[in-house]
Image: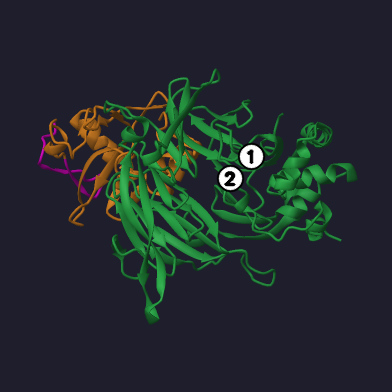
């Protein structure tokens, strides 16, 4: 099963998608925000393509619904939907820059005038970093506002960071290279066993060890270093008496576990590993090894916290692995000259480089199935739709979908639950 | 006239600044220092070119050497990894500069600033994809 793809011509540097808007940073220093729902709608030429296009690009979360998973156990229902996806796979979903203009919501100079090194949009705020530090400003602004995102963002910290990653708790993991791993903790109750490094903002040092990028594994952080040892920074919930003697939960730092211990390696050779939610991956020549995490393991009963699943071998290896990431639909392996997606259904996809930037959005509510790839002269927006039909507990590749992720009030039918405003009048 | 280490080199009239070849970045054994593998003359020329091209951000500058359309190796880090970017600093803000090979993957402060990397992309010394990776400390085949 192939992903569906929308290609948009242009000279882009970074991208985000958030609440129906596509954010594109251009290489010449602009930030262009597009109405994503209208853009997708423009490709729906037939009523019979509407459902599949919606699931592909606007509502990627919906098909994980447990009642639908039951429905898909009936191969007749499953095949009807697969046919729908197969049909739109064949469509040429392509836009020139001039065609994009009609979907433009707002255009502005990128805030601070420096193209960001990394970005996150979270809680209607844009967080971004570049050599001058970490900034945040309002995003997803109203139509009546002059700018789609604040043109005067607040500087939160003056550290030169390499990457940022948001969690739901709410925290942002901040990777500062040789400065170490930090966290901007926006929770109301702050940790009491970490060093606060910034007076004006709740930024805490988690480790002085090198951090290239990091991601959350539930309340923990897997820290990836591309030059030194990687590690899992573990946290724990404690309760303390707060104001009025009421007990409040606090997420405190617990301990670090090195990549060597997690993967049971006895030498000091550097390797690339990364983790998100329930799995940690280790790249090796010709494939990668997978560790399944069980934070609730009962060691006394012989259960293991880290369980090695089978290794995955790839024929389509494209040189040295330089970066990696994971979404529900699979793993994204960045090699020097290509991006390889090892899908949760066992299939692979190779996207030829040079790759400027790629992003997945596993913590979003509608775009979990997206992969955005910025190439030299365009952005390609892929929609992967195989993972709805994969057993989430047994899958070896990709994040296990947890039904708790559904936060909506579910109604009984797709049509009841669909926001018709997605389709205009 | 051949250059000597640890002595001020007057680059007038071409450049209105002085340069010192630091011996600390010429000898092995110091884990905190990257070392040049290019000649004294190449190091000075690399700085002069950076200065002329205005690859400068306050008291820091970055440089590279292009030979036959390829970036030349200018030095190595303590792990003997080849380095192709150079960093220069005017540490005392007195227009007397010194420099060393930039180890952008290991040291976040060695990463060239955005506007200099953009100039290098415009001149096709590096690609946009490589600029993005350099800024994030990710390996790329420069």
Question: What chain does badge 1 belong to?
Answer: A
Q: Are marks 1 and 2 on the same chain?
A: yes
Question: What chain does badge 2 belong to?
Answer: A
Q: Position of residue A340 (x, y in %)?
A: 56, 29
The stretch in magenta equals: B1-20
Shown colour of chain A: green
Residue sitting at x 44%, y 25%: A320
Say if residue A295 shows up in the picture: yes
Residue A174 against residue A376 in the figure, above or below: below
Q: Position of residue A194 (x, y in %)?
A: 29, 60
In terms of depth relative to the viewer, which is nearer, A270 or A61?
A61
In terms of depth relative to the viewer, which is nearer, A408 or B56?
A408
| Residue A12 badge | 2
Dot 1 or dot 2: first in sequence order is: 2
As drawn, the residue found furthest toward the top would be: A315
Q: What residue sits right under mark 1 in the picture?
A: A378
In terms of depth relative to the viewer, which is nearer, A41 or B93?
A41
Q: Is residue B19 magenta?
A: yes
Crowding at mark 1 (Cα within 10 Å: few <14, some 14-19, many 20+) = some
Q: Main secondary structure of the magenta part?
A: loop
In terms of depth relative to the viewer, which is nearer, A378 or A263?
A263
Q: Position of residue A350 (x, y in %)?
A: 60, 26
Residue sitting at x 76%, y 38%: A72
């Amino acid at each position: 099963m192939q992903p569906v793809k929308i290609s948009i011509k242009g000279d882009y540097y970074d991208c985000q998608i958030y609440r129906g808007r596509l954010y594109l940073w251009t290489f010449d220093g602009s930030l262009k925000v597009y109405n994503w729902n209208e853009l997708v709608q423009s490709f729906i030429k037939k009523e019979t393509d509407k459902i599949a296009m919606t699931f592909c690009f606007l509502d990627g979360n919906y098909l994980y619904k447990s009642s639908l998973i039951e429905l898909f156990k009936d191969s007749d229902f499953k095949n009807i939907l697969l046919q729908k996806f197969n049909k739109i796979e064949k469509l040429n979903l392509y836009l020139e820059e001039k065609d994009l203009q009609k979907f433009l919501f707002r255009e502005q100079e990128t805030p601070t005038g420096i193209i960001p090194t990394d970005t996150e949009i979270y809680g209607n705020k844009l967080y971004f970093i570049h050599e001058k530090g970490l900034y945040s400003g309002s995003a997803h602004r109203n139509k009546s506002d002059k700018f789609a995102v604040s043109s005067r963002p607040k500087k939160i910290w003056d550290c030169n960071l390499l990457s940022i990653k948001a969690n739901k708790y709410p925290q942002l993991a901040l990777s500062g290279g040789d400065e170490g791993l930090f966290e901007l903790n926006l929770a109301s109750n702050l940790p009491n066993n970490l060093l606060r490094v910034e007076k004006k903002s709740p930024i805490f040092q988690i480790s002085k060890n090198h951090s290239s990028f990091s991601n959350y594994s539930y309340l923990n952080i897997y820290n990836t270093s591309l030059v030194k040892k990687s590690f899992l920074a573990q946290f724990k919930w404690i309760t303390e008496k707060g104001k009025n003697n009421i007990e409040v939960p606090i997420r405190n730092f617990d301990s670090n576990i090195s990549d060597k211990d997690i993967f049971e390696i006895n030498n000091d050779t550097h390797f690339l590993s990364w983790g998100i939610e329930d799995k940690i991956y280790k790249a090796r020549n010709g494939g990668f090894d997978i560790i399944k995490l069980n934070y609730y393991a009962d060691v006394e009963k012989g259960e293991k916290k880290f369980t090695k699943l089978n290794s995955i071998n790839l024929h389509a290896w494209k040189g040295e692995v330089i970066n990696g990431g994971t979404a529900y639909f699979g793993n994204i392996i960045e090699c020097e000259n290509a991006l390889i997606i090892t899908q949760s259904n066992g299939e692979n996809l190779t996207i030829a480089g040079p790759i400027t930037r790629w992003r997945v959005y596993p913590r979003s509510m509608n775009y979990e199935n997206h992969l955005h790839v910025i190439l030299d002269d365009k952005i390609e927006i892929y929609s992967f739709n195989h993972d709805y039909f994969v057993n989430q507990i047994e899958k070896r590749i990709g994040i296990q979908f947890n039904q708790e992720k559904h936060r909506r009030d579910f109604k009984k039918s797709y049509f009841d639950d669909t926001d018709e405003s997605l389709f205009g009048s | 006239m051949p250059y000597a280490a640890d002595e001020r080199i007057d680059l007038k009239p071409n450049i209105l600044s002085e340069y010192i070849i630091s011996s600390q970045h010429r000898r092995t054994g110091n884990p905190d220092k990257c070392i040049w593998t290019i000649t004294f003359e190449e190091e000075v020329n690399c700085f002069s070119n950076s200065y002329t091209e205005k690859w400068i951000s306050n008291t820091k500058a970055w440089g590279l050497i292009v030979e036959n359309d390829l970036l030349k190796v200018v030095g190595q880090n303590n792990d003997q990894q080849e380095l192709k970017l150079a960093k220069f600093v005017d540490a005392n803000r007195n227009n007397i500069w010194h420099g060393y090979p930039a180890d952008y993957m290991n040291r976040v402060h060695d990463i060239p600033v955005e506007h200099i990397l953009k100039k290098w992309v415009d001149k096709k010394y590096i690609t946009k994809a490589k600029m993005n990776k350099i800024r994030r400390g990710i390996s790329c085949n420069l």
